[in-house]
Image: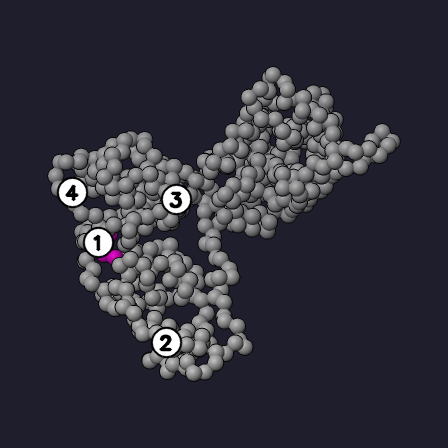
Amino acid sequence: MTTMTETSARFREFKMPDVGEGLTEAEILKWYVQPGDTVTDGQVVCEVETAKAAVELPIPFDGVVHELRFPEGTTVDVGQVIIAIDVAPGSGDAPAPAADPVQEPVEEPEAEPKGRTPVLVGYGVAESSTKRRPRKGAPAAPEAAAVAAAVQAELNGHAAPAPAAAPSVPAQGGAAGGRPLAKPPVRKLAKDLGIDLATVVPTGKDGVITREDVHAAAAPAPAASEAPAQAAPAPVAAEAPVATEPTAVPDSARETRVPVKGVRKAIAQAMVGSAFTAPHVTEFVTVDVTRTMKLVAELKEDKDMAGVRVNPLLVIAKALLVAIKRNPEVNAAWDEANQEIVRKHYVNLGIAAATPRGLIVPNIKDAHDKTLPQLAEALGELVATARDGKTSPAAMAGGTVTITNVGVFGVDTGTPILNPGESAILAVGAIKLQPWVHKGKVKPRQVTTLALSFDHRLVDGELGSKVLADVAAVLEQPKRLITWA
């Protein structure tokens, strides 16, 4: 979806598009351009992270970057202008930007201002823009710093040092008595911690409040700070320091708070919705996969599989597809609104992938129609794209059944939670050499445990058991891939 506005024949604005299915916001991860850079139609100008994936945004016209409206790390609503482009550079004097958002973004007003026109979500360009008044020289640092130094000196048993020249930063409350100066991520951090920015001492350039300032304000004050702060207490150098009470350790040094957003927020919402909507049932089976491991070794040497990655997950995926073919009722979804069971005549096979941004589940479209080499190629591309953080929202939409391979972490098995809209998910445990009764004798064999979770509204115990038993049978005797496929 391309979203843009035209402020004149010369300047055009590009809005944050809805790059997924009904997404409402995205975080700007990285700008690839800066004001003054020349851009061309289709050139990627930034990378954003939605609730589903990281996505690169191309600009839909040529020109010169005039203004970046938001800095990196800012969460922007769909429909807000993120970049302005001069499509006719050199044709006249360019209007001054409303502010330099990369250095200090202009904050959204508390109430809806007059003279602005809503654009989907948030606001577009003001009908009559004004420039920020330049800041004058900042007053001296507040007396609180000197008081804190004196209190700390008293705790240490030393005389308070003479106050040094204060840095040139505004007093608490922001410049010229206005709102405190802070970037949107810092404001959100303060809000999450319950900190009033008007009470925070800024240490950033030009009086801007930093994340460290907010954490410092959130740290519990030592007991001595309860004394009146109108003037520094008298030095107590003659007294021995009190060593019976340990110095309080700020919470910020003992824990880290991470805002829940992007992929992690989507995962949390989806898993809670799934766990408390679909009645989960999980069944387990332990199976001898020695013959499957031999088949994997043989396939790696097969010239028809040259150039593709062959591993046990490939054979397990094929075994699940065979089991679904034999039990097609499991490949379905529950339609709560219409009170219907929707049976799918195709399999979009989801593969859970751990990425730096969290767990995502892209799927292989129409996996049921693919040959083993085609399935191997699709699986390799899916994993590589996920690890690079380039999985598109479309690649994660429309899944029908999922596999999660917890065995790569050395875990025996688990009870996986269904992806919303799917009826079953198969967890594959670690493949280990274990003593196993084979042909009447105890021998070392390659063994793993499978766990199948399914939605008991549409998959009863018999059907779920048949699917799991068929997967186990194929992995125990891979030749069934020929007779059952």
| 245 displayed left or right of 215 | right
The tag earlier along the polypeptide, 1 or 3, is 3
Q: Residue at x 35, y 79 (%)?
A: 232
Secondary element under disc 2, as helix, strand or loop, is loop
Please tell me whether mark 2 or mark 1 is closer to you in this view.
Answer: 2
Q: In the drawing, what numbered circle is on residue 29?
A: 3
Q: Amino acid at mark 3?
A: Leu
Please tell me whether mark 1 or mark 4 is closer to you in this view.
Answer: 4
Q: Residues within 10 Å of mark 3 (few under 14, many from 20)?
A: some
User: In which quadrant is the N terminus drawn?
Assistant: top left
Which residue lies under the disc numbered 1? 115
Magenta stretch in the rendered image? 113-118
Query: Residue 66 appears in which quarter of the rendering?
Result: top left
Please tell me whether mark 3 or mark 2 is closer to you in this view.
Answer: 2
Find out whether the residues at labels 1 and 3 contact each other: C-beta distance under 8 Å.
Answer: no
Please tell me whether mark 2 or mark 4 is closer to you in this view.
Answer: 2
Which residue lies under the disc numbered 2? 160
Q: Looking at the picture, tell me which residue is in the foreground, 160 or 24.
A: 160
Which residue lies under the disc numbered 4? 94
